Image (tube, rainbow, N blue to C red):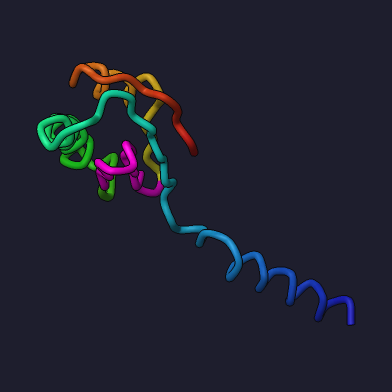
Amino acid sequence: MKNRIIQLLTLAVLVGGDPAWAGQQVTVHVKGMVCDLCARGLAKGFSAFKETGVLEDFKIELAKHTVDLMVKDGASVSDDEITKVIEGSSMAVDKIER
Protein backbone atom coordinates (compact mmCIF):
# COMPACT_ATOMS: atom_id res chain seq x y z
CA MET A 1 0.00 0.00 0.00
CA LYS A 2 2.80 2.38 0.93
CA ASN A 3 4.59 1.77 -2.40
CA ARG A 4 1.35 2.40 -4.30
CA ILE A 5 0.91 5.79 -2.59
CA ILE A 6 4.47 6.75 -3.47
CA GLN A 7 3.88 5.72 -7.10
CA LEU A 8 0.67 7.78 -7.29
CA LEU A 9 2.33 10.84 -5.76
CA THR A 10 5.25 10.56 -8.19
CA LEU A 11 2.84 10.30 -11.11
CA ALA A 12 0.85 13.32 -9.87
CA VAL A 13 4.01 15.42 -9.68
CA LEU A 14 5.09 14.40 -13.17
CA VAL A 15 1.69 14.95 -14.78
CA GLY A 16 0.39 17.85 -12.71
CA GLY A 17 3.21 20.35 -13.03
CA ASP A 18 5.60 21.50 -15.70
CA PRO A 19 7.61 18.64 -17.12
CA ALA A 20 11.09 18.31 -15.65
CA TRP A 21 12.60 18.84 -19.11
CA ALA A 22 10.73 22.09 -19.82
CA GLY A 23 12.55 25.39 -19.67
CA GLN A 24 11.41 28.26 -17.53
CA GLN A 25 8.76 30.71 -18.71
CA VAL A 26 9.21 34.36 -17.80
CA THR A 27 6.47 36.97 -18.23
CA VAL A 28 7.61 40.57 -18.41
CA HIS A 29 5.10 43.39 -17.95
CA VAL A 30 6.26 46.38 -19.98
CA LYS A 31 5.41 50.05 -19.38
CA GLY A 32 5.31 52.18 -22.51
CA MET A 33 4.70 49.43 -25.08
CA VAL A 34 1.86 51.07 -26.99
CA CYS A 35 2.42 50.42 -30.69
CA ASP A 36 3.70 47.94 -33.24
CA LEU A 37 6.98 49.84 -33.53
CA CYS A 38 7.56 49.29 -29.80
CA ALA A 39 6.89 45.57 -30.19
CA ARG A 40 9.28 45.36 -33.15
CA GLY A 41 12.04 46.97 -31.12
CA LEU A 42 11.59 44.40 -28.37
CA ALA A 43 11.46 41.57 -30.91
CA LYS A 44 14.81 42.68 -32.29
CA GLY A 45 16.33 42.75 -28.80
CA PHE A 46 14.99 39.37 -27.70
CA SER A 47 15.89 37.75 -31.04
CA ALA A 48 19.53 38.02 -30.01
CA PHE A 49 18.80 35.78 -26.99
CA LYS A 50 17.06 33.29 -29.29
CA GLU A 51 19.99 33.27 -31.72
CA THR A 52 22.49 32.61 -28.92
CA GLY A 53 20.45 29.66 -27.66
CA VAL A 54 19.17 31.19 -24.42
CA LEU A 55 15.51 31.37 -25.49
CA GLU A 56 13.38 28.71 -27.12
CA ASP A 57 11.01 31.43 -28.24
CA PHE A 58 9.30 34.62 -27.15
CA LYS A 59 5.85 36.10 -27.64
CA ILE A 60 4.98 39.78 -27.50
CA GLU A 61 1.41 40.63 -26.49
CA LEU A 62 0.91 44.27 -27.41
CA ALA A 63 -2.66 44.43 -26.04
CA LYS A 64 -1.55 42.97 -22.68
CA HIS A 65 1.74 44.92 -22.58
CA THR A 66 3.64 41.70 -21.90
CA VAL A 67 6.50 39.68 -23.29
CA ASP A 68 6.55 35.93 -22.62
CA LEU A 69 10.03 34.41 -22.74
CA MET A 70 10.47 30.65 -22.99
CA VAL A 71 13.96 30.03 -21.64
CA LYS A 72 15.72 26.88 -22.86
CA ASP A 73 16.27 24.13 -20.34
CA GLY A 74 19.63 24.63 -18.68
CA ALA A 75 19.89 28.26 -19.83
CA SER A 76 19.13 31.40 -17.87
CA VAL A 77 18.41 35.04 -18.44
CA SER A 78 18.70 37.51 -15.59
CA ASP A 79 16.30 40.30 -14.70
CA ASP A 80 19.10 42.77 -15.49
CA GLU A 81 19.51 41.35 -19.02
CA ILE A 82 15.76 41.55 -19.62
CA THR A 83 15.65 45.10 -18.27
CA LYS A 84 18.52 46.19 -20.57
CA VAL A 85 16.62 44.99 -23.65
CA ILE A 86 13.44 46.78 -22.61
CA GLU A 87 15.13 50.00 -21.51
CA GLY A 88 17.22 49.92 -24.69
CA SER A 89 13.92 50.17 -26.59
CA SER A 90 12.89 53.24 -24.52
CA MET A 91 10.39 51.39 -22.34
CA ALA A 92 10.38 50.29 -18.71
CA VAL A 93 9.85 47.04 -16.83
CA ASP A 94 6.74 47.07 -14.66
CA LYS A 95 7.27 43.57 -13.25
CA ILE A 96 8.94 40.26 -14.06
CA GLU A 97 7.18 37.01 -13.18
CA ARG A 98 9.04 33.70 -13.08
- Describe residue 24's horizontal placement relative to residue 51 as left or right: right
Q: Quick check: is 49 in the magenta stretch?
A: no
Most distant residue in the right direction: 1
Q: Position of residue 96 (x, y in %)?
A: 44, 31
Give the answer, above or below, for where 7 lies relative to 54.
below
Q: Quick check: is 70 in the magenta stretch?
A: yes
**Corner quadrant of residue 44:** top left
- Describe residue 29's horizontal placement relative to residue 45 as left or right: right
Question: Is 43 or 30 nearer to us in this picture?
Answer: 30
Tell me which residue sits at (26%, 20%) in the image: 91
Q: Position of residue 22 (x, y in %)?
A: 43, 56
Q: Position of residue 55 (x, y in %)?
A: 28, 43
Tell me which residue sits at (42%, 46%) in the image: 25
Tell me which residue sits at (58%, 70%) in the image: 15
Tell me which residue sits at (32%, 36%) in the image: 65
**Corner quadrant of residue 86:** top left
Residues in magenta?
Answer: 59-73
Q: How many marks?
A: 0
Question: Is 52 or 45 nearer to us in this picture?
Answer: 45
On the rendered image, what quadrant is the N terminus found in? bottom right
Q: Position of residue 5 (x, y in %)?
A: 82, 76
Give the answer, above or below, for where 94 lies relative to 48.
above
- Describe residue 83's horizontal placement relative to residue 40 as left or right: right
In terms of secondary structure, what is the magenta stretch mainly?
strand
Give the answer, above or below, for where 51 lies relative to 87.
below
**Corner quadrant of residue 63:** top left
